[in-house]
Amino acid sequence: MTLRYLTAGESHGKALMGILEGFPSNIPITEKYIALQLKRRRLVPGRSSRQKIETDNFEIISGLYKGKTTGAPIGLLIHNKKTNSALSQSASPMPGHADFSAMLKYDISQSALIRERASARETCIRVALGSFALRFIALLGINITSKVTNLASIDLTKNKKSIMSKIEEARKKGDTLGGVFEIKVENLPIGLGSHNQWDEKISADIGRQLLSLNAVKGIEMGEGFKLADMTGSNSLDSFELKNNKIQRTSNIAGGIEGGITNGQDIIIHCAIKAVPGIKKGITSINLKTGAKEIICSETSDTTAVFAGAVIAEYLIALEIARHILKKFGGDSFDEIKDRLLLWNKQISKKLRKS
């Protein structure tokens, strides 16, 4: 069975719901572990005051028994503390949100009905589901980390002291900030994904997961756009024989070639746009009356780049887990682990030259 997930629920509805199907059995995971992952998403710089209200209390409906997964579909509920049954009746779409296109597509006159589902609040349940995938691949020795490298044109690899002051400056002005984050995946096996068909490439699947985040507007794998300025001879990861083993001299490709993992670290950079919901207001047009209206948001984050970096870890974990199950098969953790260990042993033997 293919690993897949579904979510439901709205930003200010009663709860968010999620189902993770096709997940293996006998993977140990605690509620404390899941709560810690949700806390990581919630308590990052640039968040709105809502994150002080929401505690992301969750309920495991199915798929977990005595601290281990059972192989059954995993069902989760996250209860919203801030709920609102009386939504705004405004017919004015917010630029940069899904409002305009979706209101016309679904013939809905209330922009809030669209925004409630399109809200980034939905990523909370995806992080909860992704916690299972992150735990799974971590037990296989695969590690995912993230960091913010750029905030509103400030290079944070050189100047971290400006982070909070820049965020506070934007908050006081009622404006928002974009940025760039980096994701690194370490200790992946060679051979996840395939070059044979467009929909089997792991690079395409990872790209789809990341672009499902509302604010992600650009993705670089490896050296990304820098490759456009490089010659072929300078943009290849050459081979060398070192300590009697075939190795790569660099990682310009970022761990994926031809849609297949090559054993190097996966390195990805994502560009996050500034959040469209701004407090100082922006001009819109009422789709019913044609009247001009000023729309403002009191609940939006000042920047989504820090939260986006954390959320991306769980989305990539879900995709890595899916490809591991597709490549190695198996229904229980030990079965999958044994197959992965055997594969790595076989690959290591092929790369060793005496």
Image (cartoon, grey):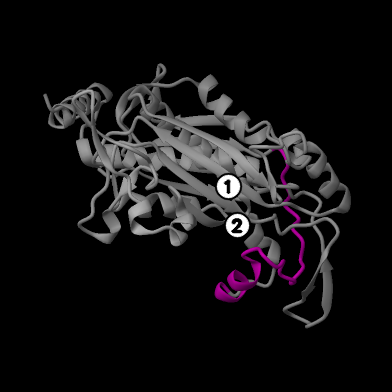
User: What x and y, as percent, mark residue 49?
Assistant: 79, 40
Depicted 301 relative to depicted 342: above or below:
below
**Which quarter of the figure is the C terminus placed in?**
top left
Q: Is residue 251 left or right of residue 11?
A: left
Q: Secondary structure at mark 1?
A: helix
For disc 1, the marked residue is: 122
Give the residue type at disc 2: Ala
Q: Is residue 1 left or right of residue 134?
A: left
Seen at 78% across and 37% down, the residue is 164
Other-residue count near label 2 (Cα within 10 Å), few / some / many at <14 / 14–19 / ≥20: some
Q: Secondary structure at mark 2?
A: helix
Residue placed furthest toward the bottom: 290
User: What x and y, as percent, mark residue 81?
Assistant: 70, 37
Seen at 77% across and 38% down, the residue is 162
Per the rendering, the mark at residue 54 is: none
**Which quarter of the figure is the N terminus placed in?**
top left
Q: Nearer the viewer, residue 53 or 279?
A: 279
Q: Nearer the viewer, residue 12 or 240?
A: 240
Q: Please give the range of residues in magenta.
A: 81-106
The reply to whether dot 1 and dot 2 touch (C-beta < 8 Å) is: yes
User: What x and y, as percent, mark residue 171?
Assistant: 83, 47
Depicted 260 relative to depicted 244: above or below:
below
Q: Is residue 343 left or right of residue 179?
A: left
Residue 104 among those drawn in magenta: yes
Please tell me in which quadrant of the rendered image residue 114 appears: bottom right
For disc 2, the marked residue is: 118
